[in-house]
Image: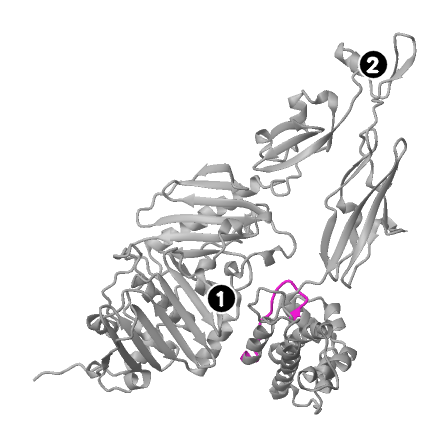
Amino acid sequence: MEAQITISGGIIGELSEKIPSNIIALNELIKNSYDAGANKVAVTLDSQSKTLTIVDDGCGMDENSINILFHISQSEKTYGVKNQYGRYTQGSKGLGFLSVFKFGKDVCWITKKEKGLKFCAQYDTLINSDNISSLVIPIEPCPEAQKGTKIVIKLEEYSADSLISYLSDLSNLQKVIYSFEDSSFEITLNVNGTSYSSKDKQPLIQIYPERQLYYVKYSSQEQKIKYYHNGVLILSKDYLFNANEYEIDIEIVIYQLKSRGKNNIIPLFYNPQGDLTPLIYINTNLFNNFNIFDPNIMKNIKTSDVLNQMIGSIRIFSSSSSLSFNSDRSQFLQNPLTDGIKEFLYNINKTIQTLGSQYKKYLLDFDILTTLTLPSNRLNDNSFLRSIIKDQFAFKDKVEIHKIDKKVVYSFAKKECYANIYQVNPNDEASSASSKGQTQEAGATTKGAEGKENSGEDNSVTTAKIILKQFNKKIDVPSGQINLYDEIIGAYDSKGNSISKNSIIVKEENAELQNAILQSVIIPCKKNIYYSYTDSITGLVTVRVEFEFVEPKSPVRSSSQKMPLIYIPAHQGYNISFNVSLGNLINQINMLDVDKYTEVLSCTLRATFELSIDSIKKCSKYSSLTWNKELKENIKLVISYIKSKKSFIGAVATSTKVDFDSLKNILEPSDVDVYVPKLHLGAHKSMQYVTKDEIVKLGKLAGVFVVVANEMINNPNIN
């Protein structure tokens, strides 16, 4: 007598739970292409046809490979070992086959190794089988198959919507595109007709170079932390590495950002909270962890040593069998190896920030001089020339000093600043007396050879100067009050003496500004500001700076790189979630040229309002509102509701980072009365015609309105 082990198809469902999310499943499929030696994998998501397609040009599969694919929880691969393609093997769990069922129940494979083959599997058939090991998957010839593998998945509606929602966040999308750091492997992603490629990745050193404080590199082989500034190695520190089971390679950029500077950094380097972070790659694949190299590590240790504005790559390489993770590759499984990796990264992170903090002062803006003028009679005194470099500048001894025309130039790491030379009369008696070893107090009088009194002061005259930081400046509206004296670097009279900023008259056009304070500006415009000083010898000197006050523009759910039509007046974009179709519509609207597609835009802009109103109507929170048959009246009803309480507008302002007053000004019922009735009439009626300028104004209103709709539906603080 003997018993036979029977395995129910329900095990498929249980094992599928080891793959916790759609994105992890997608990464598993991309890893399969990588392990197959593919040079390229193309992922296409089409929410209209509800299909997800993955195509690679890898080695493909034959009958034996297909049998291995269906041998669940069994794999011939060993994680971390370099394969025949010179790549670190990614898969080893034998669960790659199950990843496809995270998206849908019907899946087909078309593959070619030596000959084309096609086979399909249905999830329901598998899990309803009494004995899955006896289930047969038919394999058919497919002569038209291309070398590699193609997987076509019929998406469940939830999977389609959740993927679209997830990938609408550019930070998430880029983490899929750049999930591998391997130049031999290209990932392309097409989402509803919009394509992205890993080949388009911007080199780290080219990301917002204007505010890069340090470019830092470390290799466990070389065991040196190297700090670069402007491409020049300025600092190097030995840092011991004594592990045998893994290697580390660190490449990060540390910034010293000004207000809103983060918006110049690609979203790839945002963590889930929207803060900047380096990314961790293990054996070239993204490790979705933001804690083991935490940029904020120094905040609770020593705040003066914090250098947390950093991005880049922390690369870990290991073939050890002890290197293991949880199911979503976001945490290490604890063991001596992984504890050692975490401890090393913790300590080197602290060292990089602590050491970098000691050398950062004045480095980025290079404001290293204590004075901007030098007397001509001290130009040969190198000690004196170096003495005007600020003592706090850590690289003071490495600054190169040279004279060009009427300037003394100070340079370091490809940066320069200069001090102007003013002439001192070589025949001055004071200079003569000094040259003979005699001394006299500044301002004292002496008698010359003919008995005349001579002043000990320098009588040479130069031009009076007012030196400004810049002559053109852009500021976002609404602005705060601006202290215009802050724009002055220095001011000097005709004798080369520094003069007080309070001696300088500041005017806006012809009107003098009290205390040199420019009031807040809320409307985009340009203002000319004049700085004037009347020198007692040379007379009036005036300089001008132009302030341009601009409205920041960020797209609402748009991947277009051109200036969006539908936008919010903020530096960061905004993703709507209450209606996927509306998000796609906005994305398409923002791709159209206003000059060429005015009529089309008039129709589609109306649709954005109608879809927003329809979604609010369906929300149970607003069942008590009395709706109208006319679109413009319903828009005004929503505006009236959201403006009925300051807390409602405040909630929208907080979520969007749009100024409170700007929101109130944009949501103006009178504009609705003027412009909304014209929407879509230009396309098929002759009663009214919507102009380009009106389309632009309606685009701005639509951008804020769909955001209001999204907040009304999803924000618990609005009810």
Mark 1 secondary-structure assignment: helix
- Residue 375 in the image, given as x and y percentages of width and height: 75, 25
Q: Quadrant of the C terminus?
A: bottom right
Instruction: State the residue in front, 600 or 210.
Output: 600
In the image, residue 492 above or below residue 715: above
Q: Amino acid at mark 1?
A: Asn
> Which mark, residue 429?
2
Q: How is the image coloured?
A: one colour
Name which residue lies at 80% across and 55% down.
527
Name which residue lies at 71% across and 32% down.
419
Q: Quadrant of the N terminus?
A: bottom left
Q: Is residue 442 left or right of residue 623?
A: right
Q: Is residue 331 visible?
A: no
- Residue 488 in the image, given as x and y percentages of width and height: 77, 43
Q: Is residue 229 visible?
A: yes
Residue 483 shown in magenta: no
The overriding secondary structure of the stretch rendered in magenta is loop
Q: Is residue 606 left or right of residue 65?
A: right
Mark 2 secondary-structure assignment: helix
Crowd tier of the residue under label 1, counting other residues whose Cα lies within 10 Å: few below 14, some 14–19, many 20 or above: some
Instruction: State the residue in front, 612 or 624.
Output: 612
Disc 2 or 1, which lies upstream in sequence? 1
Instruction: State the residue in front, 135 or 565.
Output: 565
Count the marks: 2
Q: Is residue 281 left or right of residue 234?
A: left
Crowd tier of the residue under label 2, counting other residues whose Cα lies within 10 Å: few below 14, some 14–19, many 20 or above: some
Q: Gap in Å between the C-alphas at discs 2 and 1?
A: 74 Å
Q: Which residues are magenta?
A: 567-580
Q: Which residue is mark 1?
A: 172
Instruction: State the residue in front, 417 or 472.
Output: 472
